[in-house]
Amino acid sequence: MTDQTMKTEVTLVTESIHTGAAAKARLRKRYRDEAIFKGLGLGAILIAIGFLVLLLSSVVVKGVPAFTYNFASIPFDFSKVDRTALDKADYDAVVRESVRAIFPEVTERADRRLLGGLLSSGAPTLLRAQVLDNPGKLDQERAFSVPVQDSADLYLKGMVSKSTWTEGSTAASLSAAGDTVTLTTQQPQFASLLDSIRLRLEAEAAAVRSRLAGAVRSLNFIKANLQSTNDRLNGDLNEADRARLTADVVTMTTDLAATTKLAQDYEAAAIELERRAASAKDGESLTSSDPSVLIYAGHA
């Protein structure tokens, strides 16, 4: 036997699995994924903060009017007030009579009641507090600031309805006949108002036409059922079925008459609205569906 020496070649691996090109590529991908994840998270946080700021801004903007109030400067008449007993004076009467003095043309009881509602119910109390805090103001000035009524305050803040101002420069004249006052202008000044009324009338007419179409469909359905039921009554039926179908005919006949009347009413209403819309430029009456119109006229 011959002894042989076994030689084994060993190759040293100099590239680690943690530092090789593949490992570096995986590491870069992981860092990229982490950066994307962080970016998405940061974006979500910023979006949430943005919506929170928007919400808080909306709350603040809408809530600010609640911390402010409109006051009216009124020249109050204290001639009937005992200066030696200001704490016992009837400030309700002072407020009431002073407001009426500003509008002497208001004489009807109902109108005076409305006039008294222009100021807050707490106006007499606040007036009393101002007078007692500084009685000397009675000799210096007679105008005191008191809060207006809640509805008037909301109106002045623009929270009741939006106001649109249209300026005109034509001459105008007023004439009165009983409770009716007529304002006549040399040039058309209410074209935009009449146009808005025309659009409203056209919209109302279209809505009525839509209801009319529904009534006509119901009418056709009832007629078809009525015809079908009458045809069945002409056939061979037992007494129970004949009695039931006869009752159905009575009901459908009643429904047919009511629906026919409804369709006729819709047709008449639509025609009238369309007629008014077509002639709106010649004048129309304002309704509760139209904005209120206030006219300020002054001397040239």
Image (cartoon, helix red, strand yellow):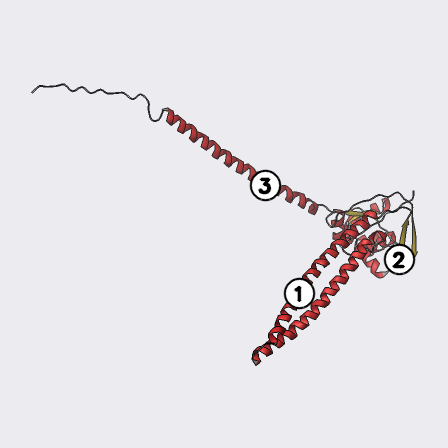
Q: CA distance from mark 2 to mark 3?
A: 54 Å
Q: Which mark is residue 51?
A: 3
280 up-or-down from 13: above or below: below
Q: Residues within 10 Å of mark 3 (few under 14, many from 20)?
A: few
Label 2 SS: strand
Kind of residue at badge 2:
Thr
- Is residue 255 rendered to the left or right of residue 295? left
Where residue 228 sits, quadrant-wise, is bottom right
Q: Residue at x 75, y 64 (%)?
A: 265
210 up-or-down from 140: above or below: below
Contact between marks 2 and 1 (CB within 8 A): the answer is no
Question: Could you tell me residue 14's position as x and y percent?
Answer: 31, 21
Contact between marks 2 and 3 (CB within 8 A): the answer is no
Question: Could you tell me residue 168's position as x and y percent?
Answer: 86, 43
Q: Residue at x 75, y 56 (%)?
A: 205
Kind of residue at badge 3:
Phe
Kind of residue at badge 1:
Asn
Q: Nearest to the eye among marks 3 and 1: give it.
A: 1
Q: Residues within 10 Å of mark 1 (few under 14, many from 20)?
A: few
Q: Which mark is residue 49?
A: none
Q: Which mark is residue 180?
A: 2
Q: Residue at x 62, y 41 (%)?
A: 54
Q: CA distance from mark 3 to mark 1?
A: 54 Å
Question: Could you tell me residue 156's position as x and y percent?
Answer: 76, 47
Q: Which mark is residue 220?
A: 1
Q: Earlier in the sequence, mark 2 or mark 1?
A: 2
256 up-or-down from 212: above or below: below
Q: Residue at x 92, y 54 (%)?
A: 175
Say whether residue 90 is visible.
Answer: no
On the rendered image, what quadrant is the C terminus found in?
Answer: top right
Query: Which residue ends up furthest to the front in the rendered image?
Result: 235
Label 3 SS: helix
